[in-house]
Image (spheres, rainbow, N blue to C red):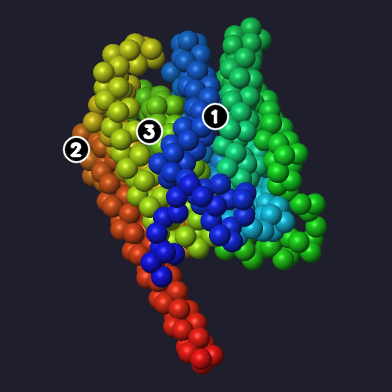
Amino acid sequence: MQQRLTIPKDRAVEGVSEEAAFVRGSLVRHVSIMSFTSSIGLMAIFAVDLIDMLFIAMLGNPALAAAIGYSGTVLFFTTSIGIGFSIAAGVLVARAIGAGQPDQAAGNASSVVVVGVLISVVTVLCVFLFMPDLLDLLGAQGETRALAVSYLSIILPSMPLLMAAMVAMAVLRAHGDAKRATLATLAGGVVNAALDPLLIFSAGLGLEGAAVASVFARLTIFIAAIYPAIKTYRGFARPSFSALRRDFSSVSIIGVPAVLANIATPVGTGIVTREMARFGTDAVAGMAIIGRLTPVAFAVVFALSGAIGPIIGQNFGAGLHARVRAAFLTALGFVSVYVTVVALLLYLLRGFVVSLFDASGETLTIVLLFCGPLAFAQLFNGWVFVGNATFNNLGHPVYSTWVNWGRHTVGTWLPVVFFASLWGAAGVLIGQALGGIVFAVVTVWLAMRMMDGQLRAAASLEFSQHQRMHILECRRH
């Protein structure tokens, strides 16, 4: 019994496919490499978004920056659906690989793509129908609202492409190939960065030029991700109705809660945006800058959920429950160190950040607040990301749904409204951060309790099997 519960060293694990790279070796190394490698691609995309904001700021119209802020909230909603299905793909593929079932992994990946693309098409149509109402709900008005409609009308139709690309990158990571997933996002970032100045300034398209550049970037990411997933790993089987019907249940069990959990995030962002809109365009512009700056500075935190998922999934599929728990604790320690270092750097560079965006008034106050104590709040976001990845890969995605919705509704709205009444626009961000702390602690507690239960169940099962073998041995003699 004891032997099964120890963490395996650098050796082959009996009965586990050689494709399952994460069931052996140093967990610190796996978490670090997967997180940093995945974050490079994310950072490229987010850095381009940040450059978009810099270019738009050069046009000298605050309404343009605010329009990006409102549009970003709507796009966050559509992208969250893609994230949910990529989580489902990562979980199902990693488990199948850990269990030595590559054909099952490919079939599951194809089913997730088909369902995800169909849902993304329906989502785009619905957003187009209700776009004015959504922007009104967020507090957009006048010129800012018209600019946001124009921007969204160009970029929204590319959502199915992004959906398929995100699933393909999840498949690559599930096979342990974070490098190719990173190269795909890097390629998209390069295309976007190259087209931005040409379309925004040279072609005189302004905000619409930034949207067109983003569409070409999404197309590039799709091609760069889907090709190696198929060519190198045969990561997708030929889609068929019978396979879709067979896999629909398993895809839905993980995919639906994962999508619902991720949709909660833009709902919370919408609440914050609406409250911030009460304090004027400058406040919304400040929040839009933070929205672009945060994922660049904390790209590793955002990548951690996708990075830790395959590690936990493969070890869970291989029945290595003690190693699952160790991976979870390693990820928590990793994100704690990373956030502390980056938050201190942001504080030291706060003057440069302010001058970069030529921030003043309410915008200046908000940016300085973020580059000060609120940057440390990303630690608790990291805890939630790790916890959600653990829930999803251990077969309890509903926990992610409840935690995320609680955090982004009650845990956002109540503290945001309360602290906004005390400290204005700055209070909105303070309330959002404080609400996140409570639910981060709840997430870690739930995850630890769940993993401890699985360890006890595994130990009990193994003890029972040992007893049966002992009884059979006695009967032979």
Q: Residue at x 78, y 53 (%)?
A: 239
Q: CA distance from mark 1 to mark 2?
A: 39 Å
**Cβ–Cβ below 8 Å for labels 3 and 1?**
no
Q: Which amino acid does the dot numbered 3 rest on?
A: Ala
Q: What percent of the width, then of the height, locates residue 351?
A: 28, 13
Q: Secondary structure at mark 2?
A: helix
Q: What percent of the width, then of the height, locates residue 310?
A: 53, 49
Q: CA distance from mark 3 to mark 1?
A: 32 Å
The crowd level at tag 2 (other Cα within 10 Å; few <14, some 14-19, many 20+) is few
Q: Secondary structure at mark 3?
A: helix
Mark 3 highlights which residue? 277
Task: Answer with mark 2 or mark 3, whichever residue precedes in sequence.
Answer: 3
Mark 1 highlights which residue? 41
Q: Is 430 on the left or on the right of 33, as rendered?
A: left
Q: Quadrant of residue 45?
A: top right
Q: What percent of the width, then of the height, locates residue 96?
A: 62, 57
Task: Answer with mark 3 or mark 1, whichever residue precedes in sequence.
Answer: 1
Q: Which amino acid does the dot numbered 1 rest on?
A: Gly
The crowd level at tag 1 (other Cα within 10 Å; few <14, some 14-19, many 20+) is many
